Image (spheres, rainbow, N blue to C red):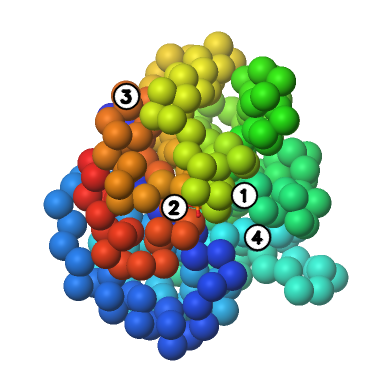
Amino acid sequence: MRKHIVAGNWKMNNGLIQTETLISELKKQSKTSDAEVMIAPAFTNLWHAFQSTRQDNIEVVAQNMHFAENGAYTGEVNAGMLKSVGIKTVILGHSERRAYFNETDESLAKKVSQALEHDMRVIFCFGEELEDRKAGNHEAVVKSQLENGLFHLEADAFKHIVLAYEPVWAIGTGETASPEQAQDMHAFIRKTLADKYSAEVADGVSILYGGSVKPNNAKEIFSKPDVDGGLIGGASLKAEDFYAIVNAF
Ligand code: PEP
C-alpha cells in the first residue's frame, strides 16, 4: 500500500530561532492520521531541525540539492552533505526552482539520479502553467515533465520516488485545483506510469497534490482516491494549520 504523506515546504522562511519555535509548536500538535509528516526548512537549519525532531514522527527533508558529487559549484549543496546532517529525502523540481533558477527537466533528471545514488528519497515536483491549462495542454506538459525528468529510471527506483503534482497557477495564489481536477490529473499520472512501467509501479507511488492546500480544503482534496497527500507551502508555517491538514486523512 502506498503511503499518505504531508510535507511542509518552508521555502526561504524561518531563521534558527523561528525554526526552533515552529518545531516546538509542531511537537505540541496531536496527530490522528496515518500520514507521514515531513518538514523542509532552509539548508542552514537542517541539522538543527534534524536533531530537534529525531525522537518525533517528523522527517526533516531538503528543498533542493546539486547534481554533482563535489566540486567548483559555489553556493551549492550536494547529496553527501545532506546525508551527513541526517537528511534522507530531498524535494526536487519545485516550480520556483524551475522558474527562478533555470532548472530544466534535463538538470532535474541528473539531480534525481544523483539523489538515488546516495540512497535518498526524492519528492519530484512538476505541474503545468496557467496557459497550458487554458490551452488544454496540461496533460501533455505533465507527461513530458515525467518523461524527461524520471523515465530514464528503472522500475525499481520508483520505490524511492514520491511525486508532487503542483499546478503552477495554484501555488501561493489562493487558487486551488478543484478536487476533481486534482483527481483527474493524479489518475492521468498513474496511468502514464502504468503505461511506461507497470500497474504495480503506478499503484505503489504516492502522488501528492500541492497548491494552496489549507485546513478548509484538505479533507476534500485528500478524499480523492489518487491523491495520497499534500505538499504544503504557506499553511505549513503555522503549526495548527499544518496539523489540521495532516489530520485531514
Ligand atoms: C508549494 O510551495 O509547494 C505550495 C504548494 O505552496 P502553497 O501551499 O503556499 O500554495
N-terminal of the two: label 2 or label 4? 4
Q: In this view, does 30 lie to the left or right of 16?
A: left
Work out which quarter of the rendered image holds the C terminus and state it.
top left
N-terminal of the two: label 1 or label 4? 4
Give the residue pinned by disc 1. Answer: 94
Q: Residue at x 49, y 74 (%)?
A: 46
Amino acid on which disc 1 is placed: His
- Looking at the image, which is closer to me, 161 or 23? 23
Give the residue pinned by disc 4. Answer: 65
N-terminal of the two: label 2 or label 3? 3
Amino acid on which disc 2 is placed: Ile
Give the residue pinned by disc 3. Answer: 225
Q: Residue at x 28, y 31 (%)?
A: 223
**Residue 53 seen in the figure:** yes
Q: Which residue lies furthest to the top in this view?
A: 195
Q: Is residue 129 left or right of residue 170?
A: right
Tell me the CA gap for discs 2 and 4. 19 Å
Tell me the CA gap for discs 2 and 1. 12 Å
Q: Of discs 1 and 4, which sits in the foreground?
A: 1
Amino acid on which disc 4 is placed: Met
Tell me the CA gap for discs 3 and 4. 31 Å
